[in-house]
Structure formats: structure tokens, C-alpha cells
Amino acid sequence: MLELEAQVAREFRLPEPPERVVTFVRHNEALLHRILGADRVARLSPAMYRFVLGRYGAFGFTLVPALDMVFERVDDLLLQMTSVGCQFLEATHRDFAMDAGVSASAVLRPISEGTAARIEAITRVNVEVPAFLRLVPRSILTAAGNAVIEAAMQGFADRIIPIVRDEMAATAR
């Protein structure tokens, strides 16, 4: 197994008080659809969603992973999102196995202008290396895998912040 890991953290401000931010973000399926795309989000229960992470492929290999995520409100100023399952909606190579986990949190702090927020996420992926990649040195596979995961997480975090700001501003009008 190849063990990969990446972390991302972002700080930003919202012009609304923390209570409104929590109410707005929690169980807002339309917001999830806007962030990920309607075809990539499925509600499994009131606090659980399946996220299709995308379609990835190279060298004739295709993979479509999905994560089941649970959203929890820990207290008035802390929201958490934790993965509880990973599966493949499509995988072209049978000698490939993967398990992934995501743990994310949003810590909110009241400030005079509204809310200061800090989001942090850690993604861990354990991958059984497919036969056609076993000749590549593990250090190269690990470095490339970590870089891909980190880039995807940073892109996702950078996309979330303006969408949350725009959606909250639109509903405040």
C-alpha cells in the first residue's frame, strides 16, 4: 500500500454573525450543488452526502471515486465534516484498491465585522499500486500522489470561499 496525505487550511471573513453562518452552511444542499455540481452530490440522510470526486485517468486507467461524508455541528462555533466510506463508481483495473478519508473542520470566531472563519482539512489515501505502476519508484509515486491530492484540496478550498460569500450575500438581500 502506498500512503498519501495532504493538508490545507484557509482563513477568511464573512460579513454575517457566526450563528447565521452555521445555519446557512449546515444542511444547505443547494450550496453543495453549487460548489461541486448537482451531478456530483447525493443526499444519503439528513446529515450525510455522497460526493463524487471526479473522473481520473492515465495510461488507460480510469477511476471515479466517491466519498460518503457526515456533517456535524459540534457547537455554535465549530462545524466538522468526516468521511465514513469510500467507494469506486468506476474502476478499469481490478488490481487497484484504495481507501480514502477526509476530516475537515470550520472554526468560526465572532468579530466586529461579522465572522472570522478558518477551514482545515486533512486527506489520507491508501492506494494499492496497480501492477503497471509497480516499476516506478515508491518515492516518485508518493511525491506525485501527495502533490495531486494537495492541489485538488487547495483548488476545492479556493473555490468554496467565494461561493459561500456570494450565496450568503444573495440571501441577505
Image: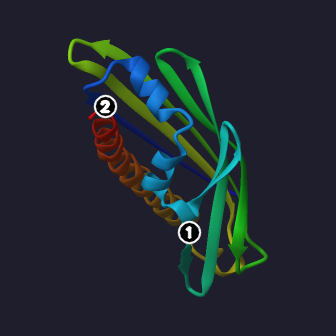
Q: Earlier in the sequence, mark 2 or mark 1?
A: 2
Residue 118 located left or right of residue 97: left
22 left or right, relative to 2: left
The amino acid beneath tag 1 is Pro
Toward the left, the furthest residue is 113
Quarter location, residue 123: top right
Q: Residue at x 62, y 78 (%)?
A: 62
Image quadrant where one finds the C terminus: top left
The location of residue 167, given as percent across then percent down, is: 34, 42
Front residue of 25 and 11: 25
Identify the image's colour scheme: rainbow, by chain, secondary structure or one colour: rainbow
Q: Residue at x 35, y 51 (%)?
A: 159
Quarter containing the N terminus: bottom right
One can see residue 106 in this view: no
**Distance of mark 2 from mark 1, alpha carbons?**
36 Å
Q: Residues within 10 Å of mark 2 (few under 14, many from 20)?
A: few
Residue at position x 52%, y 40% from top?
28
Residue 11 got which mark? 2
Report if the CB atoms under discs 2 and 1 are less than 8 Å apart: no
Secondary element under disc 2, as helix, strand or loop, is strand
Q: Which mark is residue 137?
A: 1
Say above or below: 18 vs 153: above
**Identity, as a three-letter code, of the amino acid under mark 2:** Glu
Relative to residue 167, is residue 58 depicted above or below? below
- Point out residue 103 in the picture as x, y percentages from the top left corner: 58, 37
